[in-house]
Amino acid sequence: MANQLKRTALFDRHVELGGRMVPFGGWEMPVQYSSIKDEHLAVRQHAGVFDICHMGEFLVEGPSARNFLNSILSNDVQKLNPGQGQYTLMCQKNGGVIDDLYLYCLQHDSFLLIVNASRLEEDWQWVSNQKEKLTSNMGRIDLDNKSDSLGAIAIQGPSVRSWIDDCFSIEDPRVTEQDISKLQKNQIGTYLFDSKKVWIGVTGYTGEDGFEIIAPNEIIPEIWDSLLAKGHIGCLQPAGLGARDTLRTEMCYPLYGHELTTETTPLEAGLGYFVDLNGDDFIGKQALIDQKSKGLTKKLIAFRMTGRSAPPRPEYKVLSSEGKDIGTVSSGTSSPSLSAGIGMAFVDAEHAKIGNLIEIEIRGRSFPAEIVKKPIYRKH
Amino acid sequence: MSSIVPDILKYAKTHEWVKVEGDIATIGITDHAQAELTELVFVELPAIGRKLKFGEACAVVESVKTASDIYSPITGEVIEINEELADNPGAVNIDAYNDGWFFKVRIADSNDMEGLMSAGEYNDLIGS
């Protein structure tokens, strides 16, 4: 990485809070403040707040925006009404994943895409190129990369719904706006912070209930401060990328560069639910239909170490119980919720059955693990 | 945040400490090292009887996030390891110089001690 690392609007806040800053996707981000375990368990039991300003935001607007997005994204955009969002994937023609992202429908012909920091440039180039290619026979589409001017904060955990309404106000109570705490999973609404407009969506990357707040960078630090002050009653604490990674691994949520790459299809990554093969055409659809009809050769599985071992890590080899090389770990860690080694791995499809015993090779020695159902962590 | 650096120990620039009693050296990692590594979830120690060379990677410590090698500051044979760390790797974070010791070696070459730092020199290295 030749370029200098970028800093989010919250950089000074992280340093003040004792955040340990590390490079991530071209940004200098906090990996932890107190400890990964502590922050992880705070999110599972109470609440955590994450700086996600590094993520990218694209606005796609105009009479043909909906059809355009439906032609480049795997999920069915036609299902989205204003105020609703969906998880979706952007694929190459061969089905390989360019990025996974969140798509929100703000108004009938206005959409917000939240993309990964590490893929922002590739995504923007791809979307811009496809617009040039596909829209000669479509109506107007306006693309706007808002990533430099917008920031985002995630609050996650069982307590957040009980105090989030204290932090923002409703834009206009006479219109059909509702309290933030009444929003359902995947809904998004416009609210006010200090009379400035912000978007708040119900989503996250932890498996807990929670919200993502998208706002202009100028007011991001004040929002952060307000959340920490008002969230105090809900035991809110700042949480870093380390906890974000262990939380998402317990839930088996993919991370671009690990479970998803241009060499991997959404079907191999177990994300078929977010791929609409029966609806309108989108780039990569035919390749995915072909792959589905032929059958998958590799599959993403979740596993849990069954005995004492070092934590599994990405790139470690996966062996069958007979010692045959059957795949590679894509993500692995020590689960703070389960106090056990857990991970995900791509393995030969014939070995991918839940309950199968496998082995993970750690520094030349094999340690037993079991293929388990996703997610690895479940709330009681 | 300043680290504890006991005067009675010797230190390697790779952040291990050494306590010498006769021809036996007890080895662990420094308070500064444990703080940098963050809370440990796993410690892998060398087998008893293994002959270590100065500077050889001989143990692995793992936090939630990463695995890091630990290097032997002494040439010699491993005669005892801290079995407690298998169940309680967090002891290294709580008390790096006592309960958090890693292993003991029978010193084969006392010249190794010359290459180690005093507490003062180690303090300068970590800038505490």
Image (spheres, helix red, strand yellow):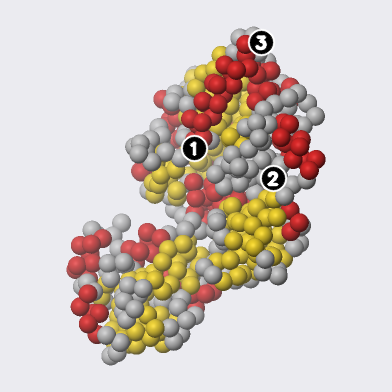
Residue at 55% across, 63% down: A311
Q: Which quadrant, please, contains the C terminus of chain B?
A: bottom left
* Residue A235 image offset from top left, x and y in percent: 53, 46
Occupied quadrant, residue A203: top right
| Left or right position of A100 against A295 | left
Mark number for residue A268?
2
Q: Earlier in the sequence, mark 2 or mark 3?
A: 3
- Which chain does the residue under circle 2 lie in? A
Please name the residue shown 61% across and 56% down the image: A328
Q: CA distance from mark 2 to mark 3?
A: 33 Å
Is A281 located above or below residue B98 in the figure?
A: above
Does residue A169 appear anywhere in the picture? no
Secondary structure under the numbered disc 3 in the rendered image? helix
The quadrant of the image that shows the N terminus of chain B is bottom left
The chain that hosts pointer 3 is A
Percent x, y of residue A185: 69, 34
Looking at the rendered structure, whether the residues under marks 2 and 3 are on a common chain is answered as yes
Image location of residue A124, percent across then percent down:
52, 26
Q: Chain of mark 1?
A: A
- The one nearer the camera, B7 or A53, is A53
Q: Mark 1 highlights which residue?
A: A118
A373 to A63, vertically: above or below: below
Question: Of the residues under marks 3 and 1, which one precedes in the sequence?
Answer: 1
Residue name at image x 60 percent, y 42 percent: A263
Q: Dividing the picture into quarters, in which one does residue B73 lie?
A: bottom left
In the rendered image, residues at marks 2 and 1 fall on the same chain: yes
Is residue A316 visible to us here?
Answer: yes
Give the number of callouts: 3
Q: Which amino acid, by three-letter code, is at mark 3?
A: Asn
Label drawn at residue A137: 3
Q: Amino acid at mark 2?
A: Glu
Looking at the picture, does residue A135 appear above or below residue B20?
above
